[in-house]
Amino acid sequence: MTDKPLADDEAELRRLRWKCRRGMRELDQMFDRYLNRSWRHAPTAERAVFLRLLQTEDDRLWHWFMGHEAASDAELDALVQRIRQLPP
């Protein structure tokens, strides 16, 4: 028997993988790392911050993830730093 919440979570994860495709290898790898290692266990609040992060322009994301700038939003900056620290 299929567990409905698990199936829903997997469907959401597939949709997110599509949204995370940025065409910049570095960003794609960082987002993929987060989805593989943290998304399933992330609290609802962190998931909401991640969804806000995905709405950010690619060039701004690149600067944040490469450490050239910090996000002015503390929640976004904390999540960016957390993602940056995930092992490859």
Image (spheres, rainbow, N blue to C red):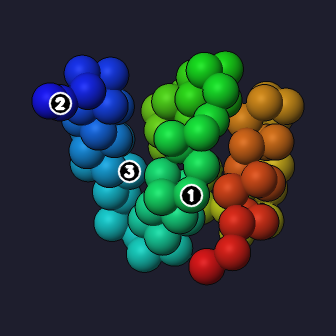
Q: From the image, state whether disc 3 or disc 1 is nearer to you.
A: 1
Q: Residues within 10 Å of mark 1 (few under 14, many from 20)?
A: few
Q: Which residue is mark 2?
A: 2
User: Which residue is label 1 attached to?
Assistant: 37
Query: Who is closer to the viewer here, 62 or 53?
Result: 53
Q: Viewer-nearest of labels 2 and 1?
A: 2
User: Measuring 32% from the left and 22% from the top, which residue is drawn there?
Assistant: 5
**87 and 77: which is toward the camera:** 87
Q: CA distance from mark 2 to mark 1?
A: 23 Å
Residue at the outermost front position? 1
Q: Position of residue 18 (x, y in %)?
A: 26, 48
Q: Amino acid at mark 3?
A: Cys
45 sits to left or right of 15:
right
Quadrant assignment for the C terminus: bottom right
Q: Which circle marks residue 50 in the picture?
A: none
Q: In the image, what residue type sits under mark 2? A: Thr
Mark 3 / mark 2, whichever is N-terminal:
2
Q: Nearer the viewer, residue 15 or 3?
A: 3
The residue identified by callout 3 is 20
Q: CA distance from mark 3 to mark 2?
A: 27 Å
x and y, in percent, of residue 42 in the image:
62, 35
Residue sitting at the far bottom: 88
Q: Residue at x 32, y 57 (%)?
A: 21
